[in-house]
Structures are given as structure tokens and as C-alpha cells.
Amino acid sequence: MPKTDRRAFTGNRLAYIALVLLAVALTLRFRDISDRYQLTFHATESVRDPFELAEPNVEIISVTREAAAAGLGTGDVLVAIGGEAYRGAVDLHAPLRNARPGDRMAVTVRSAADGSTHETSIELQALPSPPNRDILFQVVLNLVLPLFCLALGLWVAAVRIRDPLAWVLLLMMVSFAEQSGGYPRTNFGYDDWLQPLLAGYERFSSNLWGVAMMLFGIYFPERLNLDRRWPWAKWILIVPLLLRAAQLGLAQALTGHHAGSALSIEKVLPSSTIPMIMQMTAVGLFFAGMGYKTGTATNPDARRRLFLLNAGATVSLTPIFILVIMNLVRGTTWLNYPVWLTYPTFMLLLLFPLTLAYVIVVHRALDVGVVLRQSVQYLLATSTVRVLQGILMFIVIFAAAYFAADAGSSFSRPQRIQIIALSFVGVFVIRRLADKLREWVDRRFFREAYNADQILSDLAEKVRTIVETSTLMETVAKRISESLHVSRVVLLLPNGRGFEPAYALGYAEPPRAVIPETSATTEQLLREKHAQVYLEDRTSWVYEQKISDDERKALEVL
């Protein structure tokens, strides 16, 4: 397969992956938002769960007053619902999702006291109306946060579809969007073919957050030097975390209809403390990598971006880390802490994606601003051309058909034939003009598909009649700047001492720099025909070759 075809195939494949991920994530978000909206704003029209299971376990771990009145107790085992054998969580949550206060649910349980099996009926009660603070909490944590994370991740991945770091960011945002925890009535309240897919995706993606954070810390904005030296080390954490995420995702996908199978899968790696410690270690490596890069970065822009992201992540995530550690040490849950502590802790989570968006958009961390601006311009321009082309073609064809078919018109048969012939000519002319206009748009907005050889060919055609050196250099610099959207261009010519700027475009004042004729830069150009200079990258050819201080200063000036 040709190289260009391979790139196109890779881009299309990633686009399809993103499309599938978008469809799954948005479907889950739509269901979750719909259910939580009902829970928050119309709670009294829905029923509360009469008892709670340690799903996929079928043992009852807590009961409400109405369940206790019907004879249920903690430790009882759920056997059947509505006379049908209990298969999984869908059998419980799907009826509850559609039930209304006052409805009755028939359940069969095996008593923890004597082991006997008995059937009873529970009168379902309405959910209590949540206080105002819960409404704000639900909106921020379960609506604003996940939708913002999905929008940011998918946008960056779409704009920079061939950038692996953009896909790491997408993975981090998709997993972070699910950190608020799945709502059981959303995961198991729909008895359709999508239910196991969405439930498994929610659990799997939420457990990938540590992996995504660690990878982002390693590769943003440049790869960590330690990872270059020991690239295998990160897999010590990545492999078990991926296996744990796959285990939990598969178990949750089966919990809906196959509780027994899900329980067997969960028992393969039953411990939750060790995976939690590994998750926290992976996220801790994100902070370690970011902190190290912030302290060692030589480029002011890179240092500023890293500092902002580090500060935002620290303020956002440190409180939740402290509570997680307290839960692990004390064996408690979030319910054991007052709302004045837990609510601000969870609300601060929104600060992390907001900081990330600020660094990416405002401080141009991934150069999405330039790509987005050109992509939007190109999309609008080409779409406008196609719309105009379609309108003009429609007018020509419609007019020709109308006049040729109108029996009451004064046109003779030969004249009607001429009208039809002219319409074909008109369509051809419109198409050629549209192609020319799109070609101009390609040049103006530099679409990647535009052939760079064509730019050089047009430039050669334009300058072949120019005899003055100054005019020639000005024409070449402006043409390159306009075609490739390069804001600054310097042309260097030999003058005896070395290569010096002979023409500069876009600089406040002409740069003063000399590149010796026998230097690392000229050798690089002779060897590879181009030289990209990244002075802050320690793996760049600038550091691999012996380069003098004067040459380095000249490159910095340029």
C-alpha cells in the first residue's frame, strides 16, 4: 500500500474508532442524564429501591421500611422477581425504572435466618425530593463535567487525528467523564441489546483513568527522559490495570442478565485494595512527571503550560485523593463524611478539565488553535462553494427543463434543443469554475491534500522572469508565507563569513545571525534536506551533534 494510502487508511480507521466511541459515550450520557433528571427534578414520580444488593451478588445488604414490613431482611438471598427466576440486575432495576409510587413488586427470597424460601409483595414508595444543594451537585457532577470532558477529548482528537498525544487525551477525558460513578438505574434499567455494551463500557472506561493519566504525564508536552531510557517500566502498571479494567468491564456487562457468571469473573481477582493502590500510583506518576518537567523545562512557554496544568490538577484532585486514602485506611465510604466536606471535594473535579482546556486552547499546548482555525475556514469555504455550485446547477437545469417542456411558450423546437444544449454547457462551465474556486481555497487555507509540488511549480513559473535578487527573495518569501501559513520567513545567503539573513519577513527587526558554511546545521541540511530545530528537546539533532555556542545563538535568534 502506498505511503499516502496508509496514512489515509490510518486516519479513516481512527475516525471510525472515534465515531464508535462517540456513539457509545453519548448514548450512555443521554440515558444517564435522562434518568438523573427524573431523579432530581421529578423524584416523587419515581420509586426508590426497596432493597440493595451487592451486585452481582444476590445477597441483600440493606432494606427500606417497606421491604422490612414485607418480611425482607439483610442477608436474605433474592431468588425471583414477579414469579420469574432472578437472572441479574436488569430483572430488578428495569421494573423499578418504569414503576410508579403505590405499585407492588412480588419478590421471592431465601431467608438468612432459617434458609426457607418465601414469596412476598412490596408496596413501592416514592423517592424523596432532593434538597437544593443536591440539585446543583447533580447538575455539575453528572451533567456539566462528563459532557465537557467528552467534548474536549473528542474535539482535540478530531482536530489532531494523527497525533497519539491527542488520543491519550481523549482516553483520559472519556475515563474521567465516568468517574462520578454509574447510576444503577441507567446501567441496568434498560432491557435491550445496548444494555450490556453500555454497562461494560462505563465500568471499563472509568478504570482506565489511571493508565491515561500516567501516559499523559509521560508524553505531554514532550516524552519523559526516564521513559526514553526505560520504556518497558510503565508496562509494569499498565498491564495489570488494563486487565483489571477488562475484568470489571466484562463482569458489569454480564451483571445485567448473568449475575452468576459476573460473580465468577469478579472472584478471579477479588481484591480491590491493591488495584486501588495501583490506580493511585499511576495518577501519582502523572503528578511526578509533570512536576519534573515543570522544574527542568527550558522553554518559557512549555514551563508556563506545565505550571498551569500542574496547579489546576493539584487543586482539583488532591482533596479527592485524601478522601480515598482515608477510605482505604479507615474502611469507610463517602457516606461517612459530612456533605460540607464531600460536596466541595467532588465539585472541584470540574477544575481539572477546565484547566486542561485553558492550557490547550488559550496557551496553544497542542496547536489546536491553528488547525481549528484553518479547518473551520476550509470547511466553510468549500461548503459554500459546493452550495453555490449546487444552486447554480439547479437553476440552470430547472430553467432549461421549464422552457423546453412548456407547451405554451413561444420557443420553437430548434430553440428548445438549443436551450437544453446550453444548459449542459452551463453545468460544465459552473463545474469548472467551482473546481478552480476550490483549488484557490486549497491554496488559501492550505488543506493537507493540496499538492506542495503545485505550490513550488506555481512559484517557479512566477519568478522565472524576475532578474533582481531583492525582488526575487521578496516574492519567494511572501509566496511561502501565504501558501504554508508561516508567519516568519528568513532567507540566508553565503557572504564569505557564512550564511547570513539576506531577506526577512515577519520579524520586528532583521535578525542578526550567521550560520558557518561548515557547521552542524549545514551538515544536517546536506544530509536530510531539512532541519527542524527544537532547542528544548534534548533528543534533537541539535544536541546529538557538536554545535558551537555561536551557532546555537544564531539558531535561537532565527
Image (cartoon, rainbow, N blue to C red):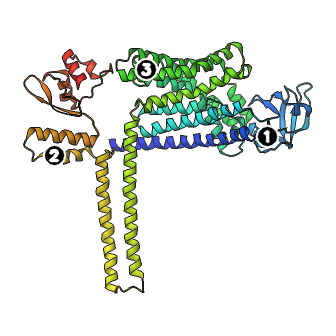
Q: Residue 108 location, x and y as percent?
A: 87, 36
Image location of residue 136, percent across then percent down = 66, 33
Q: How many marks?
A: 3
The front one of 16 and 310 is: 310
Residue for point 19% across, 19% down: 551
Of the 4 image quadrants, the one containing the C terminus is top left
SS at circle 2: helix
Between disc 2 and disc 1, the foreground one is 1
Q: Looking at the image, tell me whether mark 2 or mark 3 is earlier in sequence order.
A: 3
* Horizontal relation, residue 446 to residue 455: left or right: right
Q: Amino acid at mark 2?
A: Ala
Please give the residue where the numbered disc 3 appears in the rendered image.
231
Q: Is residue 50 left or right of residue 156?
A: right
CA gap between label 2 and label 3 equals 47 Å
Q: Residues within 10 Å of mark 2 (few under 14, many from 20)?
A: few
Question: Who comes first in sequence, dot 3 or dot 1?
Answer: 1
**What amino acid is at disc 3?**
Pro
Q: Nearer the viewer, residue 12 or 359?
A: 359
Separation (CA) of disc 2 from disc 1: 76 Å
Q: Which mark is residue 529?
A: none
Residue shown at the point (91%, 24%) measured from the top left: 113
State the residue position of label 2: 460
- Residue shown at 11%/38% (left/top)? 470
Q: Kindly identify the residue that appears in the image at 92 percent across and 25 percent down.
A: 114
Disc 1 target residue = 44
Between residue 135 and residue 317, name the one nearer to us: 135
Density class for disc 1 (Cα within 10 Å; few <14, some 14-19, many ≥20) is some
Q: Does residue 557 sit above or below 99 in this rendering?
A: above
Q: Is residue 302 above or below residue 84?
A: above
- Give the distance between the C-alpha atoms of the residues marked 3 and 1, in whole angstroms: 55 Å
